[in-house]
Image (spheres, grey):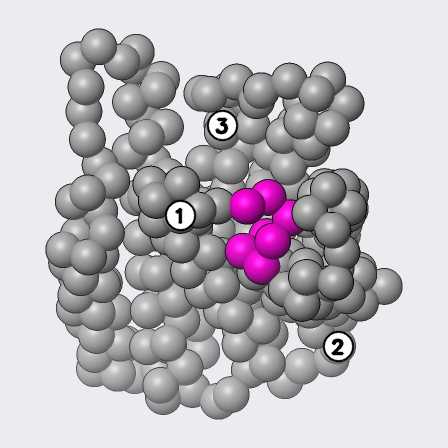
Amino acid sequence: SLLMLSALSGAVLAVGILSQEAAFHFSEIAYVIVPIGAGVAFIATAMTLPSKRKLAWSVIGAGVLAWGIGEIIWVYYEYILRTEVPYPGWADVFYVLGYPLMFVGVLLLPHVKPGRLERLRLTLDAFAGSIAVAAIMWVAYLSDQIYLDSELGFLEQFINVMYPVGDVFLLIALMILAVRRSSLRFDVRLVALSVGMIITAVADIIYVLQIEADTYIAGGWLDALWLFSYGGFVATAWYLLRPSEGTE
């Protein structure tokens, strides 16, 4: 049901069949239900897994849930209080928290046991790929987004830095997943997880660019991307319930 809701709500916003006001209200409702439901489903599903996998998938679920709590706080200010969301505020704390949790969860995923040289190759490939991703992100995105202003408070400077760095966390985690699967069997759970992560990172970058250009419209196609990313996490939780021969 959550997967259907995320797909339906994302499609509605992407196609633009609602008025701007109606799309805004629709997206706010979907933003509360889908990520919170995805996070809870993730953690509940992880609790049914063997201890070897329980911690990793629980941490990933906690990351999704943190984003969902951030969405609730955002909607509370925007939709109920009808006031500007404080920045930095608790919504930003939970948004930022989700990125390292997702990253750590990916690192904790158990590996199939390769030989020593194979494990070393995978580690070196992931390390080299991570450096490459970080370098590309710095040239194309981070250098313009990370700035320090002595007039800003510590918390605001920290949040300003952590948002773009969080996107790097996601992309490096994707690199690690890609390298791990290069010599291991296809796993639809990791594919669904990767889809959710990459859509999140892409939507984040587009959002920053649109904010700078003053072209972002709430309840539009960009919000649909975030809903689709949550749908990827819902799909991952659903696939976790299916029997698997792998060690993930």
Amino acid, disc 2: Arg
Q: Which residue is mark 3?
A: 93
Element marked by disc 1: helix
* Three-letter amino acid code at the position of disc 1: Gln
Front-most of 96 and 6?
Answer: 6
Q: Percent from the top left, x then y, of residue 111?
A: 44, 72
Left or right of 70: which side holds 214? left
Point out residue 100 in the picture as x, y percentages from the top left corner.
42, 44
Q: Quadrant of residue 159?
A: top left
- Classify residue 130 as left or right of residue 160: left
How many C-alpha atoms fall within 10 Å of the one at disc 1: few (<14), some, or many (≥20)? some
- Residue positioned 77% across, 46% down in the render: 22
Q: Is residue 62 above or below residue 154?
A: below
Residue of label 1: 210
Left or right, 66 with reference to 148? right
Q: Is residue 203 visible?
A: yes
Q: Which residues are magenta?
A: 217-223
Label 2 vs label 3, nearer the camera: 3
* Along the viewing direction, whichever of 22 and 190 lies nearer the viewer: 22
Q: Earlier in the sequence, mark 2 or mark 3?
A: 3
In the image, residue 190 sits, relative to residue 45, either above or below, namely below
Q: Earlier in the sequence, mark 1 or mark 2?
A: 1
